[in-house]
Image (cartoon, coloured by chain):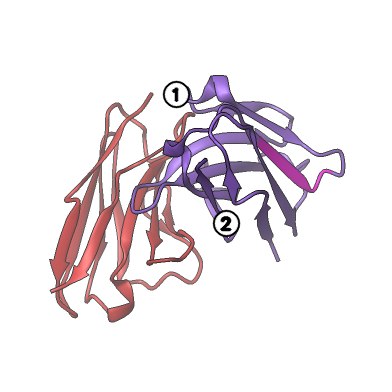
Amino acid sequence: DIQTTQSPSSLSASVGDRVTITCRASQSIGNYLNWYQQKPGKVPKSLIYAASSLQSGVPSRFSGSGSGTDFTLTINSLQPEDFATYYCQQSYMTPYTFGQGTKLEIK
Amino acid sequence: QITLKESGPTLVKPTQTLTLTCTFSGFALSTSGVAVGWIRQPPGKALEWLALFYWDDDKRYSPSLRSRLTITKDTSKYQVVLTMTNMDPVDTATYYCAHRGLFYYGSGTYYAFDYWGQGILVTVSS
């Protein structure tokens, strides 16, 4: 199985900050990497597919990059609604695997 | 408009079999490349992928749960059913079904869970 490891597991930041979350795959997955956002008590929301392509309606302050084994999700100019938990997920092959999540909290 | 909704028991006893149904609309599971997946999330923990049912009736399972899971498609073709045998309290979680969409980017075809059901919290307790 391909393992996906996120870091950090939690992160404190302020409105207006720029934050970066990292996801590492245990083997090369090309750019078959997705990012999801989940707010407390809510359903996960697809943000980014193919490592860097934003889903329709996702604000441009979100961006993704990377290929192979190392990927990043960057949020520029954090907004209050961005405080949530973020998950990466590889779709290179089954079993699809999710990272353990990064909880982004207000400082 | 794509929608999915999970249904089934919210309380099961240890050793029982759980049967969850995902009823969807807005897409056909017979469309090439489409799939419906099941993902679960224990309270306060991360998402865990369980199984996937493909448009061509192929199926994939989480290796760690493979012996306990069965995913099927109802003959109506608008429902996907997940059964999990020998339930244990550690299986207490919110269970989601999700549409695996296809996305074309550059020269490749990519997949992501773009629509999710509301989830159903299943508690395993005697």
Q: Nearer the viewer, residue A58 or B44?
A: B44
Can I make out residue A81 in this image?
yes
The residue tagged with tag 2: helix, strand or loop? Answer: strand
Q: CA distance from mark 1 to mark 2?
A: 23 Å
* Left or right side of A72 for B105: right
Magenta stretch bounds: B77-82
Report which colour depicts chain A. Answer: red
Q: Which residue is mark 2?
A: B116
Q: Which residue is rendered at x = 72% and y = 42% of the image?
A: B80
Chain bearing mark 2: B
Sequence-wise, the earlier of marks 1 and 2 is 1
* Left or right side of A87 for A24: left
Q: Amino acid at mark 2?
A: Trp
Q: Amino acid at mark 1?
A: Ser
Above or below, B114 against A18 in this view is above
Residue A87 placement (x, y as % from top left): 34, 51
Residue A98 placement (x, y as % from top left): 38, 42
Report which colour depicts chain B. Answer: purple
Mark 1 and mark 2 in contact? Answer it, CB < 8 Å: no
Q: Which residue is mark 1?
A: B64
Chain bearing mark 1: B
Above or below, B72 against A51 in this view is above
Q: Quadrant of the N terminus of chain A?
A: top left
Q: Which residue is rendered at x = 47% and y = 47% of the image?
A: B93
